[in-house]
Image: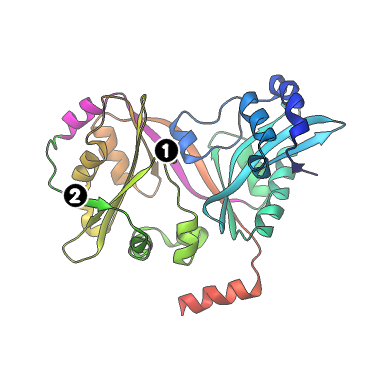
Amino acid sequence: MIRHLHPTDSPRMLQFRPSAGWGETCTLVDALRGGPSRFPTAKYATIALSPRAWQSCWVETLRGRIDAVLRAGPRSGQQAWEISEFYIRNSKSDLILNLLEQIAVPAGGAGAHRIFARIPTDSNTCNFAQKAGFSTIYRESIYQSESVRSTVTKLGVTNHSLQFRPRCQSDNGPLFRMHNAITPMEIRMKTGQTSEDWVAGMERLGRKTSEWVLDLPTGEVGALIQRSTIRTRHMFNVNWAANAGAELPGLIAAALAETNDVPALTAVPSYRPALADLLVNIGFKKQASYEVMVKPLAQTVSEIRQVFAAVS
């Protein structure tokens, strides 16, 4: 059985690292930074000593030896959890299914309606996840351009005229309606039927993410841009309404504006081929693919009634 990481586990982390493989899952930010990494011993030793951080970490042990480490918790709200990091001892791949099943218990106990996982497409972990009750929402591709400046030149939009404003809480409803209008029904069914569930499952590009909204002349929300820049890379995401599709080059230009000449990266879901085609045309190259998966968790009767009330 899994248990929470304890302060006394710090010495065991040193023994676990040489036998641990690459991570089995990652977050959106980690996918944009290159994907799952080797086990970060110092990071988890610090987490073990933190009065609060260890509560989001679990370990599987046998006779005092750590065989697996898993980190999970809310994405943007308590209703949606995500398995952010997952490390297994190389000889213990049989534990993957067991741990993916077990982590659903604390997630459901904390009020989560679903738990997400992002797994490299070519990983056997996808098979274990399916056996544990996860299903693929969509396949996601990571695209990278080596130079923001070169990309903007190829884009040919040197001075876009689109006007953006910072996202605010009152945008949640309009953004949810935009999501429902542009997202295939099968995906909507898996990611949340209410605005609250959808917002809880939203992903951001780290703590320093800035979010910008484009308003259409009709008063509707036309697009959402997420941006995050550090010294070595610029990350962005673009989502747009159907009647704002003609503005896609301008949206990309806005996402890349006022940025140093560093590599640019973004994630493209499989149901957005127009974005992938445009990125390739302006010099982006596909770097990796992931299965974005989800497992629905049991809900109480009162929660189910709330969903039906919201729909009706």
**Quadrant location, the N terminus:** top right
Label 1 vs label 2, nearer the camera: 2
Which residue shows up at 63% across the image and 38% down it? 125
Q: Is residue 305 above or below residue 222?
A: below
Report the residue that reaches farthest toward the front: 51
Q: Is residue 44 left or right of 283 when viewed as pictured?
A: right
What kind of residue is marked 2? Glu
Q: Position of residue 58 (x, y in %)?
A: 71, 41
Report the residue that reaches farthest toward the top: 18
Q: Magenta stretch containing residue 102, yes or no?
A: no
Q: Position of residue 39 (x, y in %)?
A: 63, 26
Q: Is residue 92 left or right of 224 when viewed as pictured?
A: right
Decide which of 123, 81 is in the foreground and name it. Answer: 81
Can residue 92 be seen in the rendering of this structure? no
Can residue 28 be seen in the rendering of this structure? yes
The magenta stretch is: 134-155
Sequence order check: which comes first, mark 1 or mark 2? Answer: 1
Q: Residues within 10 Å of mark 2 (few under 14, many from 20)?
A: some
Report the residue that reaches farthest toward the right: 63
Question: Please, what secondary structure does the residue beneath circle 1 have?
Answer: strand
**Which residue does the numbered mark 2 point to in the structure image?**
247
Q: Magenta stretch containing residue 137, yes or no?
A: yes
Query: Residue 141 has which mark?
Result: 1
Give the CA separation, mark 1 to mark 2: 22 Å
What kind of residue is marked 1? Ser
Q: Is residue 236 above or below residue 192?
A: above
Which residue shows up at 66% across the image and 64% down it? 298
Q: Is residue 48 above or below residue 306?
A: above
Which quarter of the figure has residue 265?
top left
